[in-house]
Image (cartoon, rainbow, N blue to C red):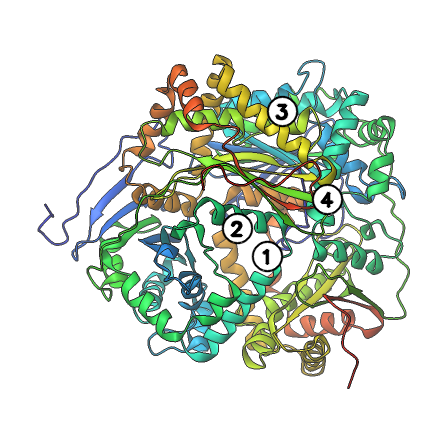
């Protein structure tokens, strides 16, 4: 049911987080605009700026086969001319108003970000709306941005970590959009035509796929009017998004030969999806194993004890249609085999012996204590509010999230370790000239 | 544990002072920072932002890679790594454990002129991290084994950041050609052989001589006021005795009289690129109007996609995929004004270079315009409003500028100072600095150029 009166807004005021002063998580309102667009708003009048973060579900997953990198190329072109303003006029206007506008193609969503001084709010919103509803894709900017993307792809070829990550994805999802590169390939980017760009913008930016968060120096009523002004020009609905769920492939070691002194090692396994009941137990487990901070099993064994790497870490990477647990390390070629061995041993030990109660308590303390630190700016809060919408976690997530972590039982963490980790099933890609690592075929492909 | 590149030149420094004068910037300043100095010489600044119950606590030492000895490069950075090893009170890596157990995030960084340590925590944990940081200011315990392990880690860090990356490797060589004598010519992380040869005693000597309250700056940003910070600082940091500090005298770069050019062919490089720098004064060396002028000049040339170089080389002439200019005005002794260009497909690096040089010639001949300077001043002022959204970044600027001698009043008065720069001063700075005999050009090529037709 939708509120019926103008300027009716649904107000869902969250309780203040603490007794002393409400934190940034408090005071998030969910309102519905006259045109029916849901907006999550947090008012923050202390600085005369407004941040708007938006996302359209879909993103690079919508790239047609052979046109990989399409969403990414669109993201580079929306502020290169729209409506009556050509590229030069549009950029001049942004500059005149000190408006910061950017777009980014994610795997599951296309993100947009607007930052403006409060005094330029209306003009900024108009430009943002124009960029989404009426991008021009003129030849000059299209070729210029294509050139920039191709140069970036060429540079990526120099970087063993980027090469290893891309190869890991291809191996993990050989038959799914998640295996394709968001930035595309030189061939696919070269093949993208203006008609492809136009089709993406016309069909990809629809209001039924839209999520919006606004944080800053702006009143509730004005937010509603402004949001409608930005998105009114977009179609109400698009084709349903239909992707199959996917499970990452397991097993196998691939080596990409590169003439570099340090090998980039990327490893991973299927992980829980965001809505999986085990997600929070997996978060605690991953923190103890390799996520965040300087106190993890991997950090201890690989770096602190043996000095094998500067960077070694792991993380959960939930996609909309797949869950991943992935990690990486960089070790000089001569000791790459030893490093991979240590990583496998750590996993095997955790499967066999579990993690200790103390590790679990430490991980929980870090995860709950550091969560509010991520909400330290208008921009960060707006980004978090959109992410919560994308994963459908509910507006009360900000209040409840630490409770979900606290509620994780030690037995669940150990069970999830056995479910998730399989040292033999690890899918590994190494870029460099690693010693002591032989290629093996995938176990189940 | 990162190597910090100089912060984006945002704030300006004039002169070098050892102690901060008590200051209240109040409503007229940019960020409302307030400062005081403890009797033992430790400077302290509070930068309030009460939006969230979070604080970032930083301690900066006026000690960096440029304070090392030739042949002993990398000691400042290796010490930074070892600072996480432990003290008598907090042994065996407990420092990071305690910070994490309290939900904090932490790290450290090393630059040419400073080294900094920071933790971001809930405001009620501020006292705890202050106590930890004060303890390791003088209480560090390091074993030979710690040194060996961390040496290996740093060598891996070097491989990852530098040796694995053809552009970074060339930058290191280019920098050495830029500064023939001054320590800004060596890499912050250190040369590989130096890192391999540093001894525990080298590291501890650097520590004992430079890690002291009278060589340190405390910056706390976030949900804190100077009145809340002062008693904590007095109780926790004031008890640490000062040491006698050696003056920071670095080798002086001789006047450059001939342009230098490096051409490196590296098959690992994907595409050709060109860079060019000129020696430039900093806000520390002065004169101030030159430094301010260069800040504005860099913005006119390269501040946005509407700026001269992007419009000229990338949009209008199509000879480059990217092009720009920069000025790093935050060095204690010297700095550079730089340019870069990445040629478009099918464009020879010489052609892109010629186009860049034509822009520079045009600049020197006709100068920047009133309109350009007015636009840039407005953009820079607006950038400062946006900057207030991230108080941790503000803390970082503060620390970096204070570490090379700026006062709180000067930082808080930066916008007004920029606003006072005239077009004539910008053009004078450009003509003074962009002198052909002081240029160093670096060209990185993926393959030998084909024979000229």
Identify the mark at residue B159; answer none if there is no mark: 4
* Image quadrant in which you'd find residue B57: top right
Dot 4: within a 10 Å radius of its alpha carbon, few (fewer than 14), some, or many (20 or more) residues?
A: many
- Determine whether label 3 and label 4 are within 8 Å by CB: no
A404, B181: nearer the viewer:
A404
- Tell me the residue that label 2 is attached to: A166
* Image quadrant in which you'd find residue B80: top right
Q: Earlier in the sequence, mark 2 or mark 1?
A: 1
Pinpoint residue B87: horizontal percent, then vertical percent: 71, 18
Identify the mark at residue A214; answer none if there is no mark: none
Pinpoint residue B128: horizontal percent, then vertical percent: 57, 21
Q: CA distance from mark 1 to mark 4?
A: 17 Å
Pinpoint residue A16: horizontal percent, then vertical percent: 31, 30
Q: Nearer the viewer, mark 2 or mark 4?
A: 2
Q: CA distance from mark 1 to mark 3?
A: 30 Å
- Assign a secondary structure to mark 1: helix
Left or right: residue A132 versus residue B276 is left
């Amino acid at each position: 049911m939708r509120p019926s009166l103008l300027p009716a807004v649904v107000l869902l005021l969250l309780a203040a987080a603490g007794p002393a002063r409400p934190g940034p998580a408090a005071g998030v309102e969910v309102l519905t605009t006259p045109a029916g667009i849901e907006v999550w708003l947090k008012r923050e009048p202390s600085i005369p700026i407004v941040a708007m973060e938006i996302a359209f579900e879909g993103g690079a997953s919508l790239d047609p086969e052979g046109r990989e990198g399409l969403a990414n190329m669109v993201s580079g072109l929306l502020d290169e001319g729209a409506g009556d303003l050509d590229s030069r006029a549009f950029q001049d206007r942004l500059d005149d108003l000190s408006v910061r506008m950017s777009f980014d193609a994610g795997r599951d969503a296309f993100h947009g970000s607007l930052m403006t001084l409060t005094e330029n709010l209306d003009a900024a919103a108009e430009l943002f709306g124009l960029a989404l509803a009426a991008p021009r894709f003129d030849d000059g900017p299209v070729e210029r941005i294509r050139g920039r993307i191709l140069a970036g792809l060429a540079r990526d070829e120099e970087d063993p970590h980027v090469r290893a990550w891309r190869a890991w994805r291809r191996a993990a999802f050989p038959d799914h959009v998640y295996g394709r590169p968001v930035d595309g390939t030189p061939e696919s980017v070269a093949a993208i035509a203006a008609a492809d760009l136009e089709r993406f913008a016309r069909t990809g930016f629809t209001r039924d796929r839209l999520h919006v968060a606004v944080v800053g120096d702006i009143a509730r009523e004005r937010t509603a009017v402004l949001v409608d002004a930005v998105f009114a020009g977009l179609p109400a609905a698009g084709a349903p998004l239909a992707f199959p769920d996917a499970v990452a492939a397991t097993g196998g070691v691939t080596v990409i030969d590169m003439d570099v002194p340090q090998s980039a090692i990327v490893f991973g396994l299927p992980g829980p999806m965001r809505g999986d009941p085990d997600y929070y137990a997996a978060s605690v487990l991953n923190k103890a194993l390799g996520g965040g901070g300087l106190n993890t099993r991997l950090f201890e064994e690989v770096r602190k004890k043996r000095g094998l790497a500067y960077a070694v870490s792991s993380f959960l990477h939930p996609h909309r249609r797949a869950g991943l647990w992935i990690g990486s390390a960089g070790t000089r070629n001569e000791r790459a085999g030893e490093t991979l061995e240590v990583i496998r041993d750590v996993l095997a030990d955790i499967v066999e012996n579990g993690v200790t109660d103390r590790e679990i308590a430490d991980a929980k303390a870090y995860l709950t204590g550091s969560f509010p630190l991520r909400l330290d700016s208008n921009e960060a809060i707006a980004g978090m509010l959109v992410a919560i919408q994308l994963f459908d976690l509910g507006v009360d997530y900000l209040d409840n999230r630490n409770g979900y972590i606290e509620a994780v039982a030690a037995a669940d963490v150990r069970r999830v370790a056995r479910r998730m980790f399989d040292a033999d099933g690890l899918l590994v890609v190494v870029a460099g000239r690693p010693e002591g690592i032989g290629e093996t075929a995938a176990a189940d492909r | 544990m990162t190597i910090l590149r100089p912060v984006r030149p945002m704030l300006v420094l004039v002169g070098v002072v050892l102690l901060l004068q008590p200051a209240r910037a109040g409503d007229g300043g940019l960020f409302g920072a307030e400062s005081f100095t403890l009797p033992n010489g430790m400077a302290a600044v509070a930068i309030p932002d009460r939006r969230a119950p979070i604080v970032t606590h930083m301690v900066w030492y006026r000690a960096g890679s440029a304070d090392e000895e030739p042949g002993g490069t990398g000691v400042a950075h290796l010490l930074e790594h070892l600072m996480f090893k432990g003290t008598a009170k907090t042994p065996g890596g407990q420092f990071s454990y305690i910070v994490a157990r309290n939900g904090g995030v932490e790290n450290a960084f090393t630059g040419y002129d400073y080294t900094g340590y920071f933790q971001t925590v809930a405001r009620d944990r501020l006292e705890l991290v202050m106590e930890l940081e004060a303890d390791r200011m003088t209480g560090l315990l390091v074993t030979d084994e710690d040194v060996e392990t961390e040496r290996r880690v740093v060598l891996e860090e070097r491989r990852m950041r530098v040796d694995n990356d053809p552009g970074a490797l060339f930058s290191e060589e280019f920098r050495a050609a830029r500064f023939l004598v001054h320590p800004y010519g060596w890499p912050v992380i250190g040369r590989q052989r130096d890192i391999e040869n540093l001894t525990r005693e080298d590291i501890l000597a650097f520590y004992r001589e430079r890690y002291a309250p009278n060589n340190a700056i405390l910056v706390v940003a976030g949900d804190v006021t100077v009145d809340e910070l002062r008693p904590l600082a007095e109780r926790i940091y004031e008890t640490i005795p000062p040491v006698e500090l050696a003056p920071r005298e670095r080798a002086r770069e001789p006047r450059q009289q001939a342009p230098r050019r490096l051409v490196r062919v590296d098959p690992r490089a994907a595409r050709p690129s060109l860079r060019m720098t000129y020696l430039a004064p900093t806000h520390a060396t002065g004169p101030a109007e030159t430094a301010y002028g260069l800040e504005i000049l860099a913005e006119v040339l390269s501040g946005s996609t509407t700026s001269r170089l992007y419009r000229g080389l990338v949009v209008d002439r199509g000879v480059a995929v990217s092009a720009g200019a920069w000025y790093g005005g935050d060095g204690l002794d010297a700095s550079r004004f730089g340019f870069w260009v990445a040629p478009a497909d099918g464009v020879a690096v010489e052609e892109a270079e010629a186009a860049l040089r034509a822009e520079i010639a045009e600049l020197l001949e006709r100068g920047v315009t009133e309109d350009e300077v007015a636009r840039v001043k407005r953009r820079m002022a607006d950038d400062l409003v946006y900057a207030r959204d991230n108080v941790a970044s503000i803390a970082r600027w503060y620390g970096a500028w204070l570490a090379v001698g700026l006062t709180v009043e000067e930082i808080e008065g930066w916008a007004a100072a920029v606003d006072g720069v005239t077009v004539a001063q910008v053009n004078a700075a450009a003509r003074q600095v962009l002198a052909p005999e002081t240029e160093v050009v670096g060209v990185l090529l993926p393959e030998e150029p084909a024979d000229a037709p």
